[in-house]
């Protein structure tokens, strides 16, 4: 399964595409995990189903769950995680946090 949040400190996880899979890293602590190609393909499959709203995917609402992040602009403390299709990109920082109130969005993580 693909984790969105660190099992240790509950911070957001960052994904990096590797040749043979995906590297998952916590933005705060040193938690790290690698997904191999086998699992990686499953992930892509799942994402493709997003547009079809197939059975099973609906349960995966945690992607859009509210996330505790204080907005830099308005100070609202709930934000939404937007996955910009990181699995299709060569970039590793395509996850945004968007304020649930004013819509201000912030890119997660620093360039590696
Ligand atoms: Zn962590
Ligand atoms: Zn805001």
Image (spheres, rainbow, N blue to C red):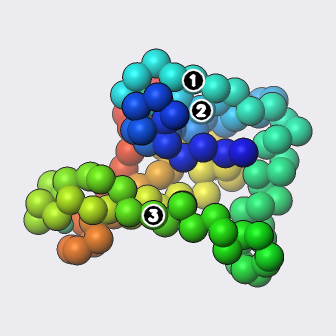
Mark with earlier residue (1, 3): 1
Circle 3 — which element?
loop
Q: First in sequence: mark 1 or mark 2? A: 2
Q: Secondary structure at mark 1?
A: strand
Residue drawn at the location 20% of the way across and 59% of the way down: 77
> Which residue is at 15% across, 55% downward?
72
Task: Residue under label 1, please give it.
Answer: 32
Q: Is residue 84 visible?
A: no
Q: Gap between marks 1 and 2, in whole Å?
A: 6 Å
Can you identify the residue that label 3 sits on?
65
User: Is the residue indicated by label 1 positioned so its CB lies within 8 Å of ligand 1?
Assistant: no
Q: How many marks?
A: 3
State the image coordinates of residue 24 (x, y, percent, origin top left): 59, 32
- Outermost left residue: 74
Residue 44 horizontal side relative to residue 65, left or right: right
Q: Is residue 40 left or right of residue 104?
A: right
Q: Is 48 located above or below residue 107 in the figure?
A: below
Label 1, label 3: how many angstroms apart (C-alpha)?
22 Å
Depth check: give the residue in front, 77 or 83: 77
Indicate the quadrant containing the N terminus: top left, top right, bottom left or bottom right: top right
**Left or right: 71 as drawn, with respect to 78:** left
| x 51%, y 22%: residue | 31
Q: Residue furthest right?
A: 38
Residue 47, given in percent of the width and then of the height, sits at 72, 62
The dot on residue 24 is 2
Quarter of the rendering containing residue 35: top right
Q: Which of pointers 3 and 2 lies earlier in the amino acid sequence?
A: 2
Task: Return the mark for residue 69.
Answer: none
- Helix, strand or loop for disc 2: strand
> Is the Cβ of the residue at disc 1 closer than 8 Å to that at disc 2?
yes
Quadrant for residue 106, please give it. Answer: bottom left
């Amino acid at each position: 399964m693909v984790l969105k949040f660190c099992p240790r400190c509950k911070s957001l996880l960052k994904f990096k595409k590797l040749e043979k899979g995906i590297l998952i890293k916590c933005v705060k602590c040193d938690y790290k995990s690698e997904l191999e190609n086998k699992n990686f393909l499953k992930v892509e499959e799942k994402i493709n189903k997003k547009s079809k709203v197939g059975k099973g995917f609906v349960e995966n609402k945690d992607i859009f769950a509210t996330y505790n992040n204080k907005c830099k602009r308005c100070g609202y403390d709930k934000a939404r995680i937007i996955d910009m299709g990181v699995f299709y990109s060569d970039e590793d920082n395509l996850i945004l946090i968007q304020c649930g109130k004013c819509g201000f969005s912030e890119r997660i993580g620093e360039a590696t």
